[in-house]
């Protein structure tokens, strides 16, 4: 992968440039893209950190992650 400012070229598909997406809340780069829930009134994609914060706001309490074997 070759990085050029806000674009990168995927070596597998060197025929096009791809724009790196920014988080709608914090403005940081998105490694894993999450779509916000409609109740949140956020347009665009958000990063995993912002998604976790919003989940905690809307669903307070202790969150237990279950293992899926």
Image: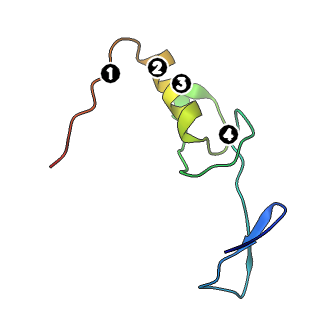
Q: In the image, 60: left or right of 27?
A: left
Q: Which residue is mark 4?
A: 43
Residue 3 numbered tag: none
Q: Quadrant of residue 60?
A: top left
Disc 2, SS: helix
Q: Residue at x 71, y 33 (%)?
A: 26
Q: CA distance from mark 2 to mark 3?
A: 5 Å
Q: N-terminal of the two: label 4 or label 3?
A: 4
Q: Which residue is mark 3?
A: 53
Please report contact status of discs 1 and 2: CB closer than 8 Å, yes or no: yes
Query: Mark 4 or mark 3, which is nearer to you?
Result: 3
Give the residue at x 46% y 25%.
55
The answer to whether 55 appears left or right of 63 in the picture is: right
Q: Label 1: how many residues lie within 10 Å, few (<14), some (14-19) or many (20+)?
A: few
Dot in front, 4 or 2: 2
Check the image and report above or below for 9 versus 3.
Answer: below
Q: CA distance from mark 1 to mark 3?
A: 12 Å
* Earlier residue among tags 4 and 1: 4
Q: Nearer the viewer, residue 8 or 61?
A: 8
Answer whether labels 2 and 3 touch (C-beta < 8 Å): yes
Q: Earlier in the sequence, mark 1 or mark 2?
A: 2
Residue at the outermost top position: 61
* Residue 58 location (% of width, % of height): 47, 18
Circle 4: is it few (<14), some (14-19), or many (20+) Cα within 10 Å?
few
**Mark 2, other Cα within 10 Å: few <14 / some 14–19 / many ≥20:** few
Task: Please give the residue where the numbered disc 1 appears in the rendered image.
Answer: 63
Q: Are marks 1 and 3 in contact (CB under 8 Å)?
A: no
What is the basis of the colouring in this image? rainbow
């Amino acid at each position: 992968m070759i990085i050029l400012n806000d674009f990168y070229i995927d070596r597998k598909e060197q025929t096009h440039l791809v724009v790196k997406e920014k988080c709608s809340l914090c403005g940081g780069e998105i490694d894993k893209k999450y779509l916000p829930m409609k109740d949140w009134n956020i347009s665009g994609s958000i990063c995993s950190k912002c998604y976790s914060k919003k989940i905690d706001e809307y669903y307070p309490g202790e969150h237990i992650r279950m293992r899926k074997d």
